[in-house]
Amino acid sequence: MSRPDNRAPDALRPVKFQRGWTKHPEGSVLVEFGDTRVLCTASVDTGVPRWRRGSGSGWVTAEYSMLPRATNTRGDREAVKGKIGGRTHEISRLIGRALRSCLDLKALGENTITIDCDVLQADGGTRTAAITGSYVALQDAVTWLTDKKMARKPDKILTRSVAAVSVGVVGGTPVLDLNYVEDSSADVDMNVVCTGDGDFVEVQGTGEEAVFDRSTLDALLDLATKGCKELTGAQVRALLT
Amino acid sequence: MSRPDNRAPDALRPVKFQRGWTKHPEGSVLVEFGDTRVLCTASVDTGVPRWRRGSGSGWVTAEYSMLPRATNTRGDREAVKGKIGGRTHEISRLIGRALRSCLDLKALGENTITIDCDVLQADGGTRTAAITGSYVALQDAVTWLTDKKMARKPDKILTRSVAAVSVGVVGGTPVLDLNYVEDSSADVDMNVVCTGDGDFVEVQGTGEEAVFDRSTLDALLDLATKGCKELTGAQVRALLT
Amino acid sequence: MSRPDNRAPDALRPVKFQRGWTKHPEGSVLVEFGDTRVLCTASVDTGVPRWRRGSGSGWVTAEYSMLPRATNTRGDREAVKGKIGGRTHEISRLIGRALRSCLDLKALGENTITIDCDVLQADGGTRTAAITGSYVALQDAVTWLTDKKMARKPDKILTRSVAAVSVGVVGGTPVLDLNYVEDSSADVDMNVVCTGDGDFVEVQGTGEEAVFDRSTLDALLDLATKGCKELTGAQVRALLT
Amino acid sequence: MSRPDNRAPDALRPVKFQRGWTKHPEGSVLVEFGDTRVLCTASVDTGVPRWRRGSGSGWVTAEYSMLPRATNTRGDREAVKGKIGGRTHEISRLIGRALRSCLDLKALGENTITIDCDVLQADGGTRTAAITGSYVALQDAVTWLTDKKMARKPDKILTRSVAAVSVGVVGGTPVLDLNYVEDSSADVDMNVVCTGDGDFVEVQGTGEEAVFDRSTLDALLDLATKGCKELTGAQVRALLT
Amino acid sequence: MSRPDNRAPDALRPVKFQRGWTKHPEGSVLVEFGDTRVLCTASVDTGVPRWRRGSGSGWVTAEYSMLPRATNTRGDREAVKGKIGGRTHEISRLIGRALRSCLDLKALGENTITIDCDVLQADGGTRTAAITGSYVALQDAVTWLTDKKMARKPDKILTRSVAAVSVGVVGGTPVLDLNYVEDSSADVDMNVVCTGDGDFVEVQGTGEEAVFDRSTLDALLDLATKGCKELTGAQVRALLT
Amino acid sequence: MSRPDNRAPDALRPVKFQRGWTKHPEGSVLVEFGDTRVLCTASVDTGVPRWRRGSGSGWVTAEYSMLPRATNTRGDREAVKGKIGGRTHEISRLIGRALRSCLDLKALGENTITIDCDVLQADGGTRTAAITGSYVALQDAVTWLTDKKMARKPDKILTRSVAAVSVGVVGGTPVLDLNYVEDSSADVDMNVVCTGDGDFVEVQGTGEEAVFDRSTLDALLDLATKGCKELTGAQVRALLT
């Protein structure tokens, strides 16, 4: 089997992070996984939502969205339809959980960090690119917070890093980091979020077109672990520059 | 470690299916996993949604909802709020995917089956009870369709069965079929949908409170596979009576 | 004229109340009028809506809803449509008014009781069954409140009981407690709410298909008064067990 | 007991109909019951709603609304809130039913008449003024339809007239056509719709503040019948000029 | 070129103001520009929106709406559609800005004046009639406020008057105060808001059907200035009676 | 007076167009006016909205939106609020009108072009940058349509070009192309859309903080005409490369 872009089954697409891509947010990263391009911003606000006031702890939340023509065919704007679709809700919740797993919310103090992931161009793997890019934006925002002396225990806020990647079975072969063409024809599709230490934060595998057995699941988890490790390396390099 | 109801870590709660619980639907099952009680109905309509017309294939969709006082504290009605929350969307989509994996939509012909899962009483595991009960309601609806000679290839519609169960790590121990108290204190929470043959349809594991390593994941998958096998047996018995 | 189920024109369908049908609510009653089955729950909250704070008085409100497949043909969920229909609003308001007429809101103190009436199976008379069942749930909730010593004057909260029934003219004959088939072909349709003492709380008669004269109205009011009296008896018996 | 405007208990307020008050609608009537002022328009469209197509029958529907400052305190616009309140829904449905009772929808043919009742100034009895004024607008619209030769059986469309009035118990006395001050302090409140022949179309009596016995109900029905008869006379005179 | 109603190109339609047209609002003016009829009310409330509290300054806001059958063809109610259209939003914002330009919000103190402009009959120029009529209602409301001694510096609240008129190019000729027929066939359409002193508050010119050069723009501005001056005179006369 | 970035009063900020910035749309331009950065895409669809079918003419529509953190302070997403604000509506309508003025919709045939303007970074003048960039994207989309031989008269579709710029009075001086700091303190604010030939398409001037006389208006129009002429030159150069 050959992949549309001739990658090896276990190869990521070229990954690129541009920090400070827009000037207003406390963290702003344009992340690219091949042709998938997501603008991830982290916005800091003092205070927390009403239900959390007085707890001494902070909060991190995320919103994911696609520009109408990020995709091959124009999609309707959710603002125009007046409601957010199930897929958008689901991905926003996933990103929020993944990012919260990086932080000690107590150490953050009563501050809120809002992650916005806006897909400018989509070619498969938008949610995993969003998580991976958002972690970099989050770290920039935490640095900003620390510089401003807003946090309770600035050096204890970030407890681990996260990265995410998609894996799937295409034409019978497990492959890493599917692009849109592969994603459309995959029998099994899985998104995996790992910490920089190689532990799992989230595993979401779906076989709508086909069911999958334990050995296939194991092969996919191996691929995803390898991919996340490489993405962690790329995050570290981006944060050093 | 002892569980709140003294079950063994790998034991299900008592499971009960009442078929024909309401008189109007083509399939109507009240399923109970301990104190969790979900009314699963399957409604048959001729025709399919607009985007599928002329395809010769059918469609299966699902909607999940909780009565306001199914839970310990009354929740606001989504109809009153005027929008469906992210959690509801996510679970409805999960149930729909799981049930569609049981069917050959071509054999169904241009008919639609709508699954409604209304949680009458919640005590943890409502989404897995909903999937497990809905499969039974779905089979009753397919029988009804077949009796009415509405389908294209009635004996080929159902291709496999599905059942679902939750697993999680509570107090350091992997346990099967968490009730509400356990779910609230779990470090890792996973929902697994299996076919009657033991393959995976969906695996969703989350570690918001704690990350998890590969061996923990393996232990949870083993438990879930065992639980789904027992639930499959209970479905078979319910359908025989 | 014979009725579909061979009842006498002035006969109720079999009535059944199951108290404590679900475990979480302060009052929870599954009421059945023949095949009509409504789950009525009463939820107690400390505090009152904003516009009532500081008044020293409590509040009672009600929400009515039908499960999508409670009826012969599946109806769309109002939560999915994003708005509540006129019929639902109207019935919710009727139930709220009827239940508030039973109480001294001053004696209740600044507590709120929310009545939820979810129709699990519909066969005519869902709003009258909802009112009749909710009164029983309300009384259980008041007992709970009293046991918790939350109310100002616990023994003065309930000032009267209410029950409700439908009457109508079918095929020229006034009949009591119409089922769905009768309701669909009725020329005149009336819902009457009475107190246990036989006074009227609410009278709503409509003749969309036919107008009605004073003597017909008198005959319908006689039937309704008789029906409510019998329902009051059934409520008393249910509350004794 | 004396009434705020010194009327006899069984006296209507001054009633006034201005036909053709706006120039665009097929029927346009500004109706006044004392200081209550409602603009009732009847708009004719060829065709019927989707669910009625091919039936050969027409349709009549109504929408009721209040200008924000029709009342003493400004109310929020429902368009701004993004949803229609329960009271508005309920009154719109009542007006629609009342007006449909005047017509043979078969004779109307597949045409739709939409009644709009916009309250310009409110002083009690807005729904009964709306019904009474709308009947006059409806008759003008039917005349227009007949002149245009659009209907199937133009001379058979209108089968009866309707008028409506409120009655209530204020300070222990049954009174006719309550203004806002009386309405606010009424123990029992009833709206009655009668045909020109004195039959009932709709009877809606509510005793939220107090329950009422059969003799009170009888007294209120007598008053309402008298009031509707006088309003019918006023309609006839307005239509002659 | 002759105009549909034989006016000179620089002539206004007959203008009429009826103050106190409804009894509840602090200012209530029915304004007519020919057959265009708008009810403008000004409602006074103590307090300001949340974002302005503690500023010591007041606020003025406006809402514009059309009755469904104000126009030749019935339009859907925005309350029924559940959202406000772009045109309504745009006009409401224009009216608000224009009216705020008349006032010293500091002198008003923390009070809010809400302007409601409800078009009862439309024949072109509804937004300009609304602004011109609302100024008269606003002045009545300010007088009311002053009489109640609610404002901080009552005699300094109103700093100037405003009036508005439409101009356009119809059949090649610049004309003043277009009615609906002219508006529908205009190549260029402009709305101008002027102060009583002849300065501009707002200039909005659009050439969707045709572009326009500087000399045409100049001619239109001359016409509009003349029209606003005459309208200012009419406002002054109305306020004297 | 000196400007924040030391520009002359009649100088534009640096302007930059990047064509083909995203790969999916038929036209895709990232336009920059200084730090204001807007992604303008033009999407082609066969067919037209329902109300235009059978007319033989095409349609052009526009939607404007801001990413939540395009601005200094994060704004709420309109999709999350469930409704589009007045400002967004107003700007979308302005862009649509401006772009439609460039085209012969008959020559386009029954095709629709949807313009999406998503503000990635805001620093004043977002609507004028959006119009100016969208014209370039529109021309690319028309070229695409022509290459596909989809249009009726491909060489007659574009009849003129448009560009837009803001002007205002800041500190008493009329200035061109205001950035955010200047815009916030402007007494008068005007947006002007011109054709490549120097005619006006749209003139929108507002003086909420101060009114303005005719000579100020003339000075602003002169500045805007000059600015649009320079922007037209930049568009021509961008389209040549």
Image (cartoon, coloured by chain):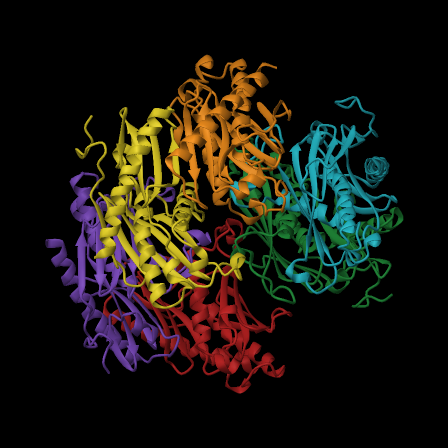
Chain colours: A cyan, B green, C red, D purple, E yellow, F orange
Q: Residue furthest left?
A: D241
The answer to whether any part of residue F97 appears in the image is no
Classify residue B132 as left or right of residue F97: right
Q: Is residue E139 above or below residue F19?
A: below
Q: Residue furthest front?
A: F1
Residue placed most toward the observer, B147 or D139: D139
Question: Which quarter of the rendered picture does the C terminus of chain E lie within?
Answer: bottom left
Residue at the (28%, 34%) spot, across then down: E223
The answer to whether any part of residue A163 appears in the image is yes
Q: Which of the 4 image quadrants contains residue A209?
A: top right
Q: Position of residue A133 (x, y in %)?
A: 75, 39
Residue placed most toward the observer, E64 or D136: E64
Residue placed most toward the observer, E116 or E134: E134
Q: Position of residue D51 (x, y in %)?
A: 38, 44
Q: Is residue C12 above or below residue B136?
A: below
Question: Which quarter of the rendered picture does the N terminus of chain E lie within?
Answer: top left
Q: Position of residue B228 (x, y in %)?
A: 77, 51
Q: Position of residue E56 (x, y in %)?
A: 50, 61
Classify residue C172 as left or right of residue F17: left
